Image: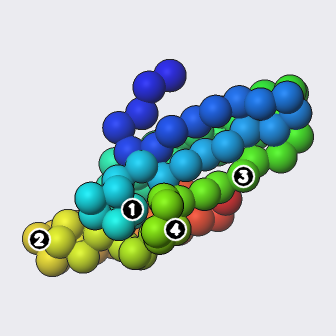
Amino acid sequence: MTYQTIIVEKKKGYAVVKLNRPHEMNAISKTMRQELYKVFVDLESDSEVKAIVLTGGEYVFSAGMDIKEMSNLPNEEGDEFLESMMKYLKKI
């Protein structure tokens, strides 16, 4: 499967998941949260994968949450934002 914000490589016995938004210092956007959740669910059910390595870019793992995206978030979407954040963090 192809992702917009992460790169996934399956190796013998493990998988490498790399954050891939280098121009945004791997800031974690809504799309990245969704993709991380999906890939961790998929890899969890893959009997060939015994471990997952989560890595970032060459200079920074991640700047954290995407502040630009958060600043444009309407107030009524705040709960949904927090739920999506907790969902992917719990899966990791």
Check contact, mark 3 vs mark 4: CB within 8 A: no
Check contact, mark 2 vs mark 1: CB within 8 A: no
Mark 2 vs mark 1: which is more N-terminal? 1
**Secondary structure at numbered mark 1:** loop
Mark 3 vs mark 4: which is more N-terminal? 3
Residue 63 — which label? none
Check contact, mark 4 vs mark 2: CB within 8 A: no
Find the distance from the CA under tag 2 to the CA under tag 1. Answer: 18 Å
Residue 61 — which label? 4
Find the distance from the CA under tag 3 to the CA under tag 1. Answer: 16 Å
- Which residue appears at 73% of the width and 38% of the height? 15
Instruction: State the residue position of label 2.
Output: 72
**Secondary structure at numbered mark 4:** loop
Q: Nearer the viewer, residue 53 or 72?
A: 53
- Which residue appears at 71% of the width and 30% of the height? 10
| Residue 25: image location, x then y, percent | 35, 66
Q: Is residue 44 left or right of residue 58?
A: right
- Which residue appears at 64% of the width and 33% of the height? 9
Mark 4 vs mark 2: which is more N-terminal? 4
- Which residue appears at 65% of the width and 55% of the height? 54
Instruction: State the residue position of label 1.
Output: 26
Q: Looking at the image, which residue sits at the far front?
A: 58
| Residue 81: image location, x then y, percent | 34, 67
